[in-house]
Image: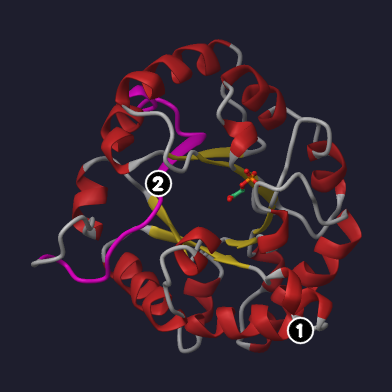
Amino acid sequence: MSKPIFAANWKMHLGPDAAREFLRTFLESYPPAGDREVWFFPAAVALETVARALADRSDIRVGAQNVHWEPKGAFTGELAVSMARAAGAQAALVGHSERRHVFGETDEETGRKVRALLEGGLIPMLCVGEKIEEREARATLKVVQRQLAVLDGLDSGVLERIPIAYEPVWAIGTGKTATPDDAAEVHAAIRAWLGERGADAAAVRVLYGGSVKPDNVAALIAEPQIDGVLVGGASLNPVAWSEMARVALD
Ligand code: PGA
């Protein structure tokens, strides 16, 4: 059984000083845990600070929020995979809904980023999820399968190492959460898609994200289809985040 992941997406919050301060408080109340992993996705400028502060914690990983697919070049404002890795990143988010819907990232670009990360030795965490109008049109599974299709052609062993975060766009930062049952239905479809491509779907970690908070994390993580959570707003408070990441698992 793979371990559940409690992932903190700090978005455009917490620079190096604030990140250091956060981790000082967080680590006081978060002793090493053998049954789960915590992943932090800080802003690029804080990656190195966070990676250094967590260097002796093998139960905690650090990742970039975004990378470019090219190894180097005239791409003002972008971050190469090798740079993220040199700063201490072990992973990166790909296809987060804000990248897709605020910055216009396409499936094709998402696919290139996945491959660049794999080639550069980092783990992509692929985010998928439908918009409210797509859910209302009952197109959720179609949209998610289209977003997953960037993984087509990868070996089953590689597929098993890529965590998938299902984040319905209408639930991100809105206070609206999918019910554990709603999420379970989509998670099962994600596993079925991976299974059809030869992956051992039980080995893949499928996370839920979208307004996960201290008061709903236990119900979400208790759902057998949910192997972790990707948390934005509620991961910015070190005390609340430590409590969430220590929630009981059964
Ligand atoms: P939220 O964000 O927890 O603030 O809804 C989740 C995410 O965007 O990953």
Identified at 82% across, 56% down, the residue is 178
Quadrant where the N terminus sits is: bottom right
Point out residue 122 in the picture as x, y percentages from the top left corner: 35, 58
Q: Is residue 119 visible?
A: yes
Secondary structure that dominates the magenta span:
loop
> Label 2's element?
strand
Q: Which residues are magenta?
A: 53-72
CA gap between label 1 and label 2 equals 31 Å
Look at mark 1 in the image and give the residue it sits on: 139
Hey, which quadrant is residue 217 in on the image? Answer: top right
Q: State which tag comes first along the sequence, 1 or 2.
A: 2
In the picture shown, does residue 78 fall above or below 149? above
In the picture shown, does residue 52 fall above or below 223? above
> Label 1's element?
loop
Q: Is residue 96 left or right of residue 42?
A: right
Name the outermost residue toward the left: 73
Identified at 51% across, 12% down, the residue is 25
Classify mark 1 as within 8 Å of ligand 1 or not, answering yes or no: no
> Is 119 covered by the magenta stretch?
no
Quadrant where the C terminus sits is: top right
Point out residue 151 in the picture as x, y percentages from the top left corner: 49, 81
Identified at 84% across, 70% down, the residue is 185
Point out residue 5 in the picture as x, y percentages from the top left corner: 62, 45
Identified at 76% across, 84% down, the residue is 139
Look at mark 2 in the image and give the residue it sits on: 63
Residue closest to the eye, 25 or 236:
236
> Is 59 covered by the magenta stretch?
yes
Q: Is residue 30 visible?
A: no
